[in-house]
Image (cartoon, grey):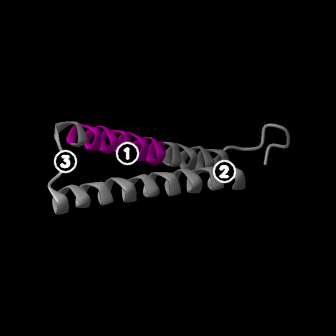
Amino acid sequence: MTQSLKWVFRLIFIVVGFELVIVSSTIAGCFMTDKCNDEDTQAIKDTMNGLATKAFALYAAEKAGQANELKRKKEPCPNCGE
């Protein structure tokens, strides 16, 4: 996997982690203040659904990159035959 692709995955991981911190603090605030209504609850559910989707897509892309790298290492060079 190229170095730039690794940095892309790291950046996406940081963004997803930051979103998770925001959602968890919102949930904690709802429990502490009891001021959350149905709209707030639905917004939290939607955000959590989006986070789960992003996390799965990140995991799948990273695994696909690792599989391609292993495949590339096993195949001989098309130009030199090594």
Residue at point 17%, 42% (across, down): 37
- Tell whether 81 sits left or right of 49: right
Q: Residue drawn at (52%, 48%), measured in percent from left and top?
A: 62
Residue 67 lies in magenta, yes or no?
no
* Occupied quadrant, residue 17: bottom left
User: Do the numbered discs 1 and 3 sit on residues whose CB atoms are within 8 Å?
Assistant: no
Residue 51 badge: 1
Residue type, numbered disc 2: Lys
Q: What mark, if any, has residue 38 been given in the picture?
A: none
Foreground residue, 71 or 40?
40
Earlier sequence position, callout 3 versus callout 2: 3
Residue 35 at x, y = what percent? 18, 51
- Cα–Cα gap, marks 1 and 2: 33 Å
Q: Mark 2 points at which residue?
A: 73
Amino acid type, mark 1: Leu
**Residue type of the residue flagged with mark 3:** Cys
Give the labeled residue for mark 3: 36
Nearest to N terminus: mark 1 or mark 3 = 3
Left or right of 79: which side holds 10? left
Magenta span contains residue 52:
yes
**Image quarter for residue 31?**
bottom left
Residue drawn at (49%, 48%), measured in percent from left and top? 63
Which stretch did the figure color magenta?
Answer: 41-60
Do callouts 3 and 2 mark residues in contact (Cβ within 8 Å)?
Answer: no
